[in-house]
Image (tube, helix red, strand yellow):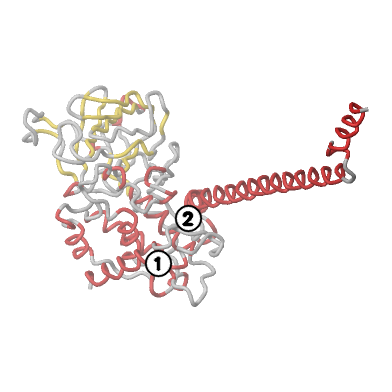
Amino acid sequence: MVQQRRQRSGQGSDPSRKPGFSLKLQKKADQKAKRKKKRNSFVWGSFLVAFVLFLCLVCLGVTLLFFPYLLFLDKEKLKNDFVAGGATTGICAIADQQAGQVLDAKGVNYFWPVPTVSRISSQFGPRKSPTPGGSSNHKGIDISIAGGGAALLPFYSMADGQVIYAGPATGYGQVIYVQHAGGVVTKYGHIDSHYEVKRGDMVKKGQRLGRIGAGRVGSSTGPHLHFQVEVNGTAVNPLQYVKFGSSLQPGNGMNKPTLPTPAVPAPAICDSPIVKPGNVDISIAYEPLNIDAMYQYLSTRNGVGTRMGNRSILQMVDRVSKQYGINPYLLLAITGAEQSFVPNNNRNADKIIRNPWNTFGSWQNTDNSTEESAIYAARAIVKLQANKPDNVGPIQWMNMPAGVNPKGFYAADPKWAGNVSVIMQKLKQMGG
Protein backbone atom coordinates (compact mmCIF):
# COMPACT_ATOMS: atom_id res chain seq x y z
CA MET A 1 0.00 0.00 0.00
CA VAL A 2 2.78 2.39 1.01
CA GLN A 3 4.77 1.44 -2.07
CA GLN A 4 1.78 2.06 -4.29
CA ARG A 5 1.28 5.51 -2.71
CA ARG A 6 4.96 6.32 -3.31
CA GLN A 7 4.64 5.24 -6.89
CA ARG A 8 1.55 7.34 -7.37
CA SER A 9 3.25 10.20 -5.51
CA GLY A 10 6.32 9.84 -7.79
CA GLN A 11 4.14 9.78 -10.83
CA GLY A 12 2.32 12.87 -9.64
CA SER A 13 5.64 14.79 -9.18
CA ASP A 14 6.90 14.12 -12.76
CA PRO A 15 6.73 17.55 -14.54
CA SER A 16 6.28 15.87 -17.87
CA ARG A 17 3.01 14.62 -16.62
CA LYS A 18 1.72 18.15 -15.95
CA PRO A 19 -0.94 19.30 -18.36
CA GLY A 20 0.34 21.69 -21.06
CA PHE A 21 4.02 21.06 -20.36
CA SER A 22 4.72 19.51 -23.78
CA LEU A 23 3.10 22.52 -25.51
CA LYS A 24 5.31 25.01 -23.62
CA LEU A 25 8.45 22.99 -24.38
CA GLN A 26 7.64 22.90 -28.07
CA LYS A 27 6.95 26.65 -28.08
CA LYS A 28 10.36 27.36 -26.52
CA ALA A 29 12.05 25.11 -29.05
CA ASP A 30 10.30 26.91 -31.90
CA GLN A 31 11.35 30.32 -30.55
CA LYS A 32 14.94 29.15 -30.21
CA ALA A 33 14.92 27.84 -33.78
CA LYS A 34 13.52 31.15 -35.05
CA ARG A 35 16.20 33.12 -33.22
CA LYS A 36 18.90 30.88 -34.65
CA LYS A 37 17.46 31.21 -38.15
CA LYS A 38 17.27 34.98 -37.80
CA ARG A 39 20.84 35.10 -36.54
CA ASN A 40 22.06 32.97 -39.46
CA SER A 41 20.14 35.16 -41.92
CA PHE A 42 21.80 38.27 -40.45
CA VAL A 43 25.26 36.69 -40.74
CA TRP A 44 24.76 35.64 -44.35
CA GLY A 45 23.17 38.97 -45.21
CA SER A 46 26.10 40.86 -43.70
CA PHE A 47 28.52 38.65 -45.61
CA LEU A 48 26.68 39.28 -48.88
CA VAL A 49 26.67 43.07 -48.33
CA ALA A 50 30.39 43.02 -47.48
CA PHE A 51 31.13 40.95 -50.58
CA VAL A 52 29.19 43.33 -52.83
CA LEU A 53 30.99 46.33 -51.30
CA PHE A 54 34.31 44.58 -51.86
CA LEU A 55 33.49 44.00 -55.53
CA CYS A 56 32.50 47.66 -55.91
CA LEU A 57 35.80 48.79 -54.38
CA VAL A 58 37.73 46.45 -56.67
CA CYS A 59 35.91 47.80 -59.74
CA LEU A 60 36.54 51.38 -58.63
CA GLY A 61 40.21 50.65 -58.03
CA VAL A 62 40.62 49.03 -61.44
CA THR A 63 38.88 51.98 -63.09
CA LEU A 64 41.09 54.55 -61.36
CA LEU A 65 44.22 52.53 -62.06
CA PHE A 66 43.69 51.72 -65.72
CA PHE A 67 41.48 54.48 -67.11
CA PRO A 68 44.39 56.86 -67.75
CA TYR A 69 46.15 53.99 -69.54
CA LEU A 70 43.05 53.27 -71.62
CA LEU A 71 42.92 56.95 -72.57
CA PHE A 72 46.28 56.59 -74.32
CA LEU A 73 45.85 52.95 -75.36
CA ASP A 74 44.89 53.50 -78.99
CA LYS A 75 48.07 55.24 -80.02
CA GLU A 76 47.35 55.16 -83.73
CA LYS A 77 43.97 56.80 -83.11
CA LEU A 78 45.63 59.49 -81.03
CA LYS A 79 48.05 60.08 -83.85
CA ASN A 80 45.29 60.64 -86.39
CA ASP A 81 42.31 61.96 -84.41
CA PHE A 82 43.02 65.56 -85.32
CA VAL A 83 44.48 65.15 -88.78
CA ALA A 84 42.31 66.11 -91.73
CA GLY A 85 40.88 63.02 -93.34
CA GLY A 86 42.49 60.84 -90.67
CA ALA A 87 45.87 60.72 -92.38
CA THR A 88 48.99 62.86 -92.49
CA THR A 89 49.88 64.69 -95.67
CA GLY A 90 53.67 64.49 -95.42
CA ILE A 91 56.46 62.61 -93.66
CA CYS A 92 56.75 61.98 -89.97
CA ALA A 93 60.06 61.95 -88.14
CA ILE A 94 58.69 60.12 -85.13
CA ALA A 95 58.22 56.43 -85.80
CA ASP A 96 55.79 54.40 -83.77
CA GLN A 97 57.33 53.07 -80.57
CA GLN A 98 56.95 49.53 -81.85
CA ALA A 99 60.06 48.27 -83.61
CA GLY A 100 59.67 47.86 -87.34
CA GLN A 101 57.94 51.16 -88.01
CA VAL A 102 59.92 53.08 -90.62
CA LEU A 103 60.35 56.75 -91.44
CA ASP A 104 59.57 57.80 -94.98
CA ALA A 105 62.69 59.39 -96.38
CA LYS A 106 60.99 60.30 -99.67
CA GLY A 107 62.85 57.69 -101.67
CA VAL A 108 66.37 59.11 -101.39
CA ASN A 109 69.24 56.73 -100.84
CA TYR A 110 70.39 57.47 -97.30
CA PHE A 111 68.84 58.82 -94.15
CA TRP A 112 70.42 61.20 -91.63
CA PRO A 113 70.54 59.15 -88.39
CA VAL A 114 69.28 61.89 -86.04
CA PRO A 115 66.75 63.85 -88.11
CA THR A 116 66.08 66.49 -85.43
CA VAL A 117 69.76 67.38 -84.86
CA SER A 118 72.14 68.96 -87.36
CA ARG A 119 75.04 69.88 -85.06
CA ILE A 120 78.31 67.97 -85.55
CA SER A 121 80.47 68.44 -82.48
CA SER A 122 83.44 66.45 -83.79
CA GLN A 123 84.34 65.95 -87.45
CA PHE A 124 85.85 62.94 -89.23
CA GLY A 125 89.65 62.63 -89.28
CA PRO A 126 92.54 63.90 -87.14
CA ARG A 127 91.61 65.69 -83.94
CA LYS A 128 92.69 66.35 -80.39
CA SER A 129 91.16 63.60 -78.27
CA PRO A 130 88.43 64.96 -76.00
CA THR A 131 89.18 62.29 -73.36
CA PRO A 132 92.49 61.09 -71.86
CA GLY A 133 93.83 58.13 -73.79
CA GLY A 134 91.26 58.53 -76.57
CA SER A 135 91.99 58.21 -80.28
CA SER A 136 93.33 61.24 -82.15
CA ASN A 137 92.05 59.81 -85.41
CA HIS A 138 88.27 60.12 -85.38
CA LYS A 139 86.74 57.41 -87.57
CA GLY A 140 83.30 58.97 -87.66
CA ILE A 141 81.39 62.11 -86.72
CA ASP A 142 79.71 63.05 -83.44
CA ILE A 143 76.14 64.32 -83.60
CA SER A 144 75.06 66.19 -80.48
CA ILE A 145 73.24 69.10 -78.88
CA ALA A 146 75.07 71.56 -76.63
CA GLY A 147 74.38 71.08 -72.95
CA GLY A 148 73.58 67.37 -73.18
CA GLY A 149 70.29 67.82 -75.01
CA ALA A 150 70.86 64.79 -77.25
CA ALA A 151 70.36 62.36 -74.38
CA LEU A 152 67.81 59.65 -75.23
CA LEU A 153 66.96 61.09 -78.63
CA PRO A 154 66.09 58.31 -81.11
CA PHE A 155 68.44 57.49 -83.97
CA TYR A 156 67.70 55.69 -87.22
CA SER A 157 69.33 53.41 -89.77
CA MET A 158 71.04 55.22 -92.65
CA ALA A 159 69.92 52.60 -95.19
CA ASP A 160 68.44 49.14 -95.66
CA GLY A 161 70.56 46.40 -94.17
CA GLN A 162 71.07 43.75 -91.51
CA VAL A 163 72.18 44.19 -87.90
CA ILE A 164 75.46 42.34 -87.50
CA TYR A 165 76.20 43.39 -83.91
CA ALA A 166 74.41 45.05 -80.99
CA GLY A 167 76.22 45.17 -77.66
CA PRO A 168 79.12 46.63 -75.69
CA ALA A 169 82.30 47.93 -77.36
CA THR A 170 85.49 49.33 -75.88
CA GLY A 171 85.46 53.12 -75.80
CA TYR A 172 81.93 53.42 -77.16
CA GLY A 173 79.96 51.88 -74.31
CA GLN A 174 77.15 50.41 -76.39
CA VAL A 175 77.02 50.10 -80.20
CA ILE A 176 74.94 48.84 -83.11
CA TYR A 177 76.52 47.81 -86.44
CA VAL A 178 74.45 47.50 -89.63
CA GLN A 179 75.68 45.82 -92.83
CA HIS A 180 74.43 47.42 -96.06
CA ALA A 181 74.87 46.62 -99.76
CA GLY A 182 78.16 47.32 -101.53
CA GLY A 183 80.38 46.52 -98.55
CA VAL A 184 79.06 49.45 -96.52
CA VAL A 185 78.74 49.17 -92.74
CA THR A 186 77.35 51.86 -90.48
CA LYS A 187 78.22 52.00 -86.79
CA TYR A 188 76.31 53.84 -84.07
CA GLY A 189 78.11 54.36 -80.75
CA HIS A 190 77.59 55.87 -77.26
CA ILE A 191 73.99 54.68 -77.31
CA ASP A 192 71.48 53.61 -74.68
CA SER A 193 71.58 49.90 -73.82
CA HIS A 194 67.85 49.44 -74.55
CA TYR A 195 68.23 48.57 -78.24
CA GLU A 196 65.21 48.23 -80.48
CA VAL A 197 66.89 45.73 -82.77
CA LYS A 198 69.09 42.67 -82.27
CA ARG A 199 71.74 40.82 -84.20
CA GLY A 200 70.35 39.26 -87.37
CA ASP A 201 67.41 41.68 -87.72
CA MET A 202 66.73 43.10 -91.16
CA VAL A 203 66.20 46.86 -91.00
CA LYS A 204 64.90 49.47 -93.40
CA LYS A 205 66.24 52.90 -94.24
CA GLY A 206 64.94 55.26 -91.58
CA GLN A 207 64.01 52.48 -89.13
CA ARG A 208 64.55 53.41 -85.51
CA LEU A 209 67.39 51.43 -83.93
CA GLY A 210 67.53 52.87 -80.42
CA ARG A 211 68.33 56.02 -78.49
CA ILE A 212 71.42 58.07 -77.78
CA GLY A 213 72.82 57.29 -74.35
CA ALA A 214 72.28 59.58 -71.39
CA GLY A 215 75.34 60.93 -69.59
CA ARG A 216 78.81 59.62 -70.37
CA VAL A 217 78.44 56.33 -72.19
CA GLY A 218 81.85 54.83 -72.86
CA SER A 219 84.75 57.26 -73.31
CA SER A 220 82.81 60.44 -73.93
CA THR A 221 82.30 63.91 -72.52
CA GLY A 222 78.51 63.80 -72.74
CA PRO A 223 75.50 62.52 -74.69
CA HIS A 224 76.10 62.25 -78.44
CA LEU A 225 75.87 59.76 -81.29
CA HIS A 226 79.12 58.52 -82.80
CA PHE A 227 78.18 57.81 -86.42
CA GLN A 228 80.69 55.87 -88.51
CA VAL A 229 80.61 54.62 -92.10
CA GLU A 230 82.98 51.94 -93.36
CA VAL A 231 83.44 50.72 -96.93
CA ASN A 232 85.08 47.31 -97.25
CA GLY A 233 86.48 47.69 -93.72
CA THR A 234 87.88 51.21 -94.15
CA ALA A 235 86.36 54.15 -92.31
CA VAL A 236 85.27 56.97 -94.64
CA ASN A 237 83.79 60.39 -94.00
CA PRO A 238 80.05 59.86 -93.36
CA LEU A 239 79.32 63.26 -94.88
CA GLN A 240 80.27 61.77 -98.26
CA TYR A 241 77.09 59.73 -97.96
CA VAL A 242 74.57 61.68 -95.97
CA LYS A 243 74.02 65.17 -94.60
CA PHE A 244 71.40 66.71 -92.38
CA GLY A 245 68.27 67.32 -94.45
CA SER A 246 69.71 65.72 -97.61
CA SER A 247 71.17 62.49 -98.94
CA LEU A 248 73.66 61.68 -101.68
CA GLN A 249 73.21 59.40 -104.63
CA PRO A 250 75.85 56.62 -104.65
CA GLY A 251 78.60 56.76 -107.26
CA ASN A 252 80.75 53.98 -108.63
CA GLY A 253 81.42 51.52 -105.85
CA MET A 254 79.21 53.57 -103.53
CA ASN A 255 82.20 55.66 -102.45
CA LYS A 256 82.18 58.38 -105.13
CA PRO A 257 78.91 60.21 -104.59
CA THR A 258 77.50 62.64 -107.09
CA LEU A 259 76.09 66.03 -106.16
CA PRO A 260 73.57 66.11 -103.33
CA THR A 261 69.99 65.27 -104.16
CA PRO A 262 67.68 67.46 -102.06
CA ALA A 263 65.46 65.60 -99.66
CA VAL A 264 62.64 66.78 -97.48
CA PRO A 265 64.05 67.36 -93.98
CA ALA A 266 62.32 65.20 -91.43
CA PRO A 267 60.32 67.48 -89.13
CA ALA A 268 60.28 66.90 -85.40
CA ILE A 269 56.63 65.88 -85.39
CA CYS A 270 54.09 64.63 -87.90
CA ASP A 271 53.22 67.47 -90.24
CA SER A 272 49.47 67.20 -89.78
CA PRO A 273 47.45 70.41 -90.00
CA ILE A 274 47.62 72.72 -87.02
CA VAL A 275 44.60 72.36 -84.78
CA LYS A 276 42.27 75.30 -85.13
CA PRO A 277 42.25 77.59 -82.06
CA GLY A 278 38.50 77.06 -81.75
CA ASN A 279 39.12 73.41 -80.83
CA VAL A 280 40.24 74.35 -77.31
CA ASP A 281 39.22 76.98 -74.80
CA ILE A 282 40.96 80.32 -75.32
CA SER A 283 42.49 80.04 -71.84
CA ILE A 284 44.61 77.06 -72.94
CA ALA A 285 45.10 78.11 -76.58
CA TYR A 286 48.62 78.41 -77.98
CA GLU A 287 50.91 81.29 -77.16
CA PRO A 288 54.69 81.37 -77.68
CA LEU A 289 56.78 79.90 -74.88
CA ASN A 290 59.43 82.16 -73.35
CA ILE A 291 62.19 79.61 -73.64
CA ASP A 292 64.89 81.78 -72.03
CA ALA A 293 62.77 82.43 -68.93
CA MET A 294 61.76 78.79 -68.61
CA TYR A 295 65.34 77.62 -69.06
CA GLN A 296 66.58 80.03 -66.40
CA TYR A 297 63.98 78.79 -63.92
CA LEU A 298 63.98 75.05 -64.63
CA SER A 299 67.73 74.60 -65.07
CA THR A 300 68.36 75.99 -61.56
CA ARG A 301 65.15 75.01 -59.75
CA ASN A 302 65.70 74.09 -56.09
CA GLY A 303 69.43 74.41 -56.57
CA VAL A 304 69.76 71.14 -58.50
CA GLY A 305 67.93 71.92 -61.73
CA THR A 306 65.61 69.67 -63.69
CA ARG A 307 65.68 67.58 -66.84
CA MET A 308 62.96 69.82 -68.29
CA GLY A 309 65.42 72.71 -67.96
CA ASN A 310 66.92 71.85 -71.32
CA ARG A 311 66.67 74.23 -74.27
CA SER A 312 66.10 71.52 -76.86
CA ILE A 313 63.30 70.01 -74.77
CA LEU A 314 61.72 73.41 -74.18
CA GLN A 315 61.89 74.18 -77.91
CA MET A 316 60.24 70.83 -78.59
CA VAL A 317 57.46 71.57 -76.06
CA ASP A 318 56.76 74.87 -77.81
CA ARG A 319 56.79 73.19 -81.22
CA VAL A 320 54.41 70.40 -80.24
CA SER A 321 52.08 72.84 -78.48
CA LYS A 322 51.90 75.03 -81.57
CA GLN A 323 51.19 71.99 -83.71
CA TYR A 324 48.13 71.11 -81.64
CA GLY A 325 47.01 74.60 -80.75
CA ILE A 326 47.47 74.22 -77.01
CA ASN A 327 49.32 76.41 -74.52
CA PRO A 328 52.95 75.28 -74.01
CA TYR A 329 52.79 76.49 -70.41
CA LEU A 330 50.01 73.94 -69.85
CA LEU A 331 52.06 71.12 -71.37
CA LEU A 332 55.00 72.19 -69.21
CA ALA A 333 52.83 72.56 -66.09
CA ILE A 334 51.62 68.98 -66.39
CA THR A 335 55.23 67.78 -66.08
CA GLY A 336 55.48 69.91 -62.96
CA ALA A 337 52.36 68.39 -61.42
CA GLU A 338 53.22 64.85 -62.49
CA GLN A 339 57.00 64.74 -61.94
CA SER A 340 58.13 68.09 -60.45
CA PHE A 341 59.78 68.81 -63.83
CA VAL A 342 62.05 65.74 -63.24
CA PRO A 343 64.70 66.93 -60.75
CA ASN A 344 68.28 66.16 -61.78
CA ASN A 345 68.93 64.41 -58.47
CA ASN A 346 66.13 61.89 -59.01
CA ARG A 347 67.82 58.51 -59.46
CA ASN A 348 65.33 57.64 -62.24
CA ALA A 349 65.58 61.01 -63.98
CA ASP A 350 67.04 59.57 -67.19
CA LYS A 351 64.03 57.25 -67.50
CA ILE A 352 61.34 59.64 -66.29
CA ILE A 353 62.35 62.35 -68.78
CA ARG A 354 61.22 60.05 -71.56
CA ASN A 355 57.65 60.36 -70.30
CA PRO A 356 57.27 63.18 -67.74
CA TRP A 357 53.60 63.56 -68.76
CA ASN A 358 52.86 60.03 -67.48
CA THR A 359 51.03 59.13 -70.67
CA PHE A 360 49.78 55.52 -70.66
CA GLY A 361 49.36 55.80 -66.88
CA SER A 362 53.03 56.10 -65.86
CA TRP A 363 56.52 56.76 -67.13
CA GLN A 364 57.23 53.13 -66.27
CA ASN A 365 54.65 51.85 -68.77
CA THR A 366 56.30 53.19 -71.93
CA ASP A 367 59.64 53.43 -73.66
CA ASN A 368 58.92 56.58 -75.67
CA SER A 369 61.23 59.46 -76.43
CA THR A 370 60.40 62.73 -74.68
CA GLU A 371 58.99 64.14 -77.91
CA GLU A 372 56.76 61.16 -78.55
CA SER A 373 55.32 61.44 -75.05
CA ALA A 374 54.72 65.17 -75.56
CA ILE A 375 52.77 64.41 -78.73
CA TYR A 376 50.59 61.83 -77.00
CA ALA A 377 49.96 64.23 -74.10
CA ALA A 378 49.06 67.10 -76.45
CA ARG A 379 46.62 64.97 -78.41
CA ALA A 380 45.07 63.67 -75.22
CA ILE A 381 44.53 67.26 -74.03
CA VAL A 382 42.73 68.17 -77.24
CA LYS A 383 40.74 64.94 -77.17
CA LEU A 384 39.58 65.60 -73.60
CA GLN A 385 38.26 69.06 -74.52
CA ALA A 386 35.41 67.56 -76.54
CA ASN A 387 31.89 68.19 -75.17
CA LYS A 388 33.19 70.57 -72.47
CA PRO A 389 30.31 72.44 -70.76
CA ASP A 390 30.58 76.24 -70.68
CA ASN A 391 30.52 76.32 -66.89
CA VAL A 392 33.54 74.02 -66.45
CA GLY A 393 37.14 75.09 -66.96
CA PRO A 394 39.22 73.24 -69.60
CA ILE A 395 41.76 71.88 -67.11
CA GLN A 396 39.05 70.87 -64.63
CA TRP A 397 37.21 69.10 -67.47
CA MET A 398 40.25 66.85 -67.92
CA ASN A 399 40.09 65.92 -64.23
CA MET A 400 36.41 65.05 -63.83
CA PRO A 401 35.41 61.76 -62.13
CA ALA A 402 35.07 58.67 -64.30
CA GLY A 403 32.01 58.77 -66.51
CA VAL A 404 31.50 62.55 -66.42
CA ASN A 405 33.74 63.45 -69.34
CA PRO A 406 32.75 61.03 -72.14
CA LYS A 407 36.34 61.04 -73.43
CA GLY A 408 37.80 60.00 -70.07
CA PHE A 409 40.16 61.86 -67.73
CA TYR A 410 43.84 62.70 -67.61
CA ALA A 411 44.39 62.04 -63.90
CA ALA A 412 42.33 60.48 -61.13
CA ASP A 413 43.69 62.66 -58.32
CA PRO A 414 40.95 65.26 -57.64
CA LYS A 415 43.64 67.84 -56.79
CA TRP A 416 45.36 67.44 -60.15
CA ALA A 417 43.51 70.24 -61.98
CA GLY A 418 44.17 72.72 -59.19
CA ASN A 419 47.86 71.86 -59.08
CA VAL A 420 48.27 72.13 -62.84
CA SER A 421 46.40 75.46 -62.95
CA VAL A 422 48.56 77.00 -60.21
CA ILE A 423 51.81 75.83 -61.84
CA MET A 424 50.67 77.03 -65.27
CA GLN A 425 49.85 80.52 -63.98
CA LYS A 426 53.21 80.71 -62.21
CA LEU A 427 55.06 79.74 -65.39
CA LYS A 428 53.09 82.23 -67.47
CA GLN A 429 53.95 85.01 -65.05
CA MET A 430 57.65 84.12 -65.33
CA GLY A 431 57.33 84.07 -69.10
CA GLY A 432 55.88 87.57 -69.12
The location of residue 120, given as percent across then percent down, is 18, 44
Identify the disc placed on residue 88. 2
Q: Earlier in the sequence, mark 1 or mark 2?
A: 2
Q: Is residue 324 left or right of residue 45?
A: left
Q: CA distance from mark 1 to mark 2?
A: 17 Å
Quadrant housing the C terminus: bottom left
Asked whether the viewer can see residue 253, the reply is no
Q: Residue furthest bottom?
A: 391
The location of residue 362, given as percent across then percent down, is 40, 47
For label 2, the SS is: loop
Quadrant housing the N terminus: top right
Foreground of the two, 200 or 284: 284
Amino acid under label 2? Answer: Thr
For label 1, the SS is: loop
Amino acid under label 1? Answer: Gly
Pointer 1 residue: 325
Residue 333 in the image: above or below residue 361: below
The location of residue 228, given as percent across then percent down, is 23, 32
Residues packed near mark 2 inside 10 Å, few (<14), some (14 to 19) or many (20 plus): some
* C-beta proximity under 8 Å, tags 1 and 2: no
